[in-house]
Amino acid sequence: MKHRIGYRVVEEEDLERLAASAHHEGVVADVLRIEPQPLSDWLQQLGPAGPALAIWLDGVGNPHNFGAILRSAAHFGATVLLPARSPLSLSGAAARVAEGGAEAVPLVRLPESTVALARLREAGFILAATVVRGGDDLFAAPPAPRLVYVMGAEGEGMDAALAAACDRRLSIPGSGAVESLNVAAATAVLLARWAARDRR
């Protein structure tokens, strides 16, 4: 075998300690964490033309929501953008919820917000803040071919200054029985809307 990978057999209690969970299926791997790539590198790889979709996670911190977002992003071919000071990382909890999706999603580290907004616009992206109320109906018009959905934190929502700096504000219409969808469920709806943009 060209690449030999070392392993050792341990007791069940050791597996749980190493995995920090009882959900390990009998195998735990100790791997190097891949750091998110810089925005400039991602934009260069992307090129100047063609459709592209990304999700900017402003203040999202729950690893289970992050994992669910990664799974949806993998399904719809989206990139995840992380703010400069975001504590989010691909933890064991997030990877478990993503169920294989994390490996398929590019993670990009953004510079400071005003710089990130300018560089994304230069690359042809429209930035859409997702808000609980007062935004345009998500389903009223087809989304832009190059689009960044900006998602707010689970509790306090999106930074008001960032929402104001975006090109559009979008809301997902619903029955009113609940105030809103959680950030992971809302992301799935938004990504599906973008994927269906050219279908009749």
Image (tube, rainbow, N blue to C red):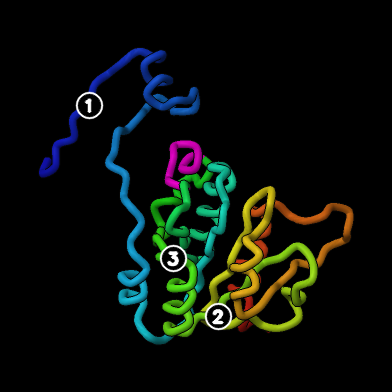
Left or right relative to 124: residue 160: right
Query: Residue 107, percent across and down?
Result: 41, 58
Q: Please state which of residues 34 and 114 is positioned toward the viewer in this rendering.
A: 114
Label number found at residue 126: 2
Q: Please state which of residues 84 and 139 is positioned toward the viewer in this rendering.
A: 84
Q: Which residues are magenta?
A: 88-96
Left or right relative to 199: residue 13: left
Q: Quadrant of residue 192?
A: bottom right
Does 91 appear in magenta? yes
Report crowding for label 2: few under 14, some 14 to 19, many 20 or more residues within 10 A (C-alpha).
many
Three-letter amino acid code of the residue under disc 3: Glu
Q: Earlier in the sequence, mark 2 or mark 1?
A: 1
Q: Is residue 83 above or below residue 62?
A: below
Residue beneath label 3, please?
A: 112
Query: Residue 66, percent across and down?
Result: 54, 49
Q: Earlier in the sequence, mark 3 or mark 1?
A: 1
Q: Quadrant of residue 1?
A: top left
Three-letter amino acid code of the residue under disc 2: Ile
Q: Residue at x 46, y 47 (%)?
A: 87
Secondary structure of residue under mark 3: loop
Query: Residue 98, percent across and down?
Result: 50, 47
Residue beneath label 1, please?
A: 7
